[in-house]
């Protein structure tokens, strides 16, 4: 089973100080691969970690923690990572747990280079999704146990319906048919699924790393993410990367 969420920003990027196009220099998909038989236990484990780490915020929100979520982009800020040791420890526990149950972290993305005049968000998303599917299929073909297959769940996003339809058609044909993909990618609501919230947290982390990988001079403050998480993430990852050139 594969859970992926978006990282960075799909819109064009001028610079960190641009009046309009300043969100992120990268865009991609990140999350994790986990054996299907481990999903239920992992979901429960992550839920417990979330409730412990963010108890104050959950209590203040007045919602049941099963449907309350903290977005990864809001969680993984320079201030939070620098200030809260427990966040750093929980993050490493998540990376360790994924590997312990036979899983891997996974991410694919790129540095955005098109000017606002020619940038095409749909083409960008489609290109990243196509590359992710190819790499996941290759993982099953060459790296995973024999006869491995995968399902891909993505965070729900109304504007991505047509792209997922295109990906579905690619599953059954095209240049590189996805022979190891059981069903076309599908979308789920992250606030209802602890498994997708895990992917969202990982995407938030990869988004911060991707920014400094792509534009180190513009994002020097993100060096803290490299210090605490880069080596551990790379150890846990398979067939992953952010193209920065």
Image (tube, helix red, strand yellow):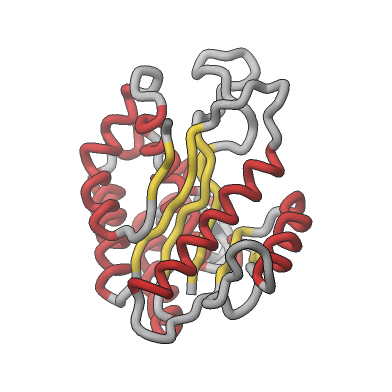
The x and y percentages for residue 44 are 42, 76
Q: How many marks?
A: 0
The structure residue drawn at horizontal position 32% and vertical position 24%, both measured from the top left corner, is 221
The x and y percentages for residue 138 are 44, 67
Asked which quadrant contains residue 53, the reply is: bottom left
The structure residue drawn at horizontal position 47% and vertical position 65%, both measured from the top left corner, is 136
Quadrant into which the C terminus falls: top left
Q: Is residue 61 above or below residue 180?
A: above
**As rendered, which of 144 and 80 lies closer to the eye?**
144
**As rendered, which of 93 and 23 lies closer to the eye?**
23
The x and y percentages for residue 183 are 63, 77
The structure residue drawn at horizontal position 68% and vertical position 62%, both measured from the top left corner, is 167
**As rendered, which of 229 and 28 lies closer to the eye?**
28
The x and y percentages for residue 103 are 34, 71
Q: Is residue 125 above or below residue 162?
A: above
Q: Is residue 110 above or below residue 147?
A: above
The structure residue drawn at horizontal position 48% and vertical position 69%, both measured from the top left corner, is 137
Q: Is residue 169 left or right of residue 8?
A: right
């Amino acid at each position: 089973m594969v859970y992926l969420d978006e990282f960075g920003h799909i819109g064009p990027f001028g610079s960190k100080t641009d009046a309009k196009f300043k969100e992120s220099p990268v865009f991609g998909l990140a999350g994790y691969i986990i054996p299907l038989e481990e999903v239920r236990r992992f979901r429960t484990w992550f839920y417990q970690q979330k409730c412990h780490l963010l108890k104050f915020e959950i209590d203040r929100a007045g919602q049941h923690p099963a449907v309350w979520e903290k977005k990864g982009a809001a969680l993984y800020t320079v201030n939070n990572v620098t200030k809260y040791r427990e966040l750093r420890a929980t993050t490493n526990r998540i990376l360790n747990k994924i590997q312990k149950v036979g899983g891997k972290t996974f991410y694919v993305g790129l540095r955005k280079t098109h000017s606002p005049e020619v940038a095409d968000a749909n083409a960008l998303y489609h290109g990243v999704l196509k590359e992710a599917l190819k790499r996941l299929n290759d993982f099953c073909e060459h790296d995973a146990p024999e006869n491995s297959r995968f399902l891909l769940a993505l965070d729900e996003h109304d504007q991505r319906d047509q792209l997922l339809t295109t990906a579905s058609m690619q599953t059954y044909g095209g240049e590189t048919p996805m022979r190891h993909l059981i069903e076309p990618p599908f979308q789920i609501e992250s606030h209802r699924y602890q498994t997708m919230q895990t992917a969202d947290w990982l995407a938030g982390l990869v988004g911060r790393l991707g920014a400094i990988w792509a534009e180190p001079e513009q994002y020097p403050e993100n060096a803290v993410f490299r210090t605490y998480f880069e080596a551990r993430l790379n150890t846990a990852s398979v067939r992953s990367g952010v193209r920065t050139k």
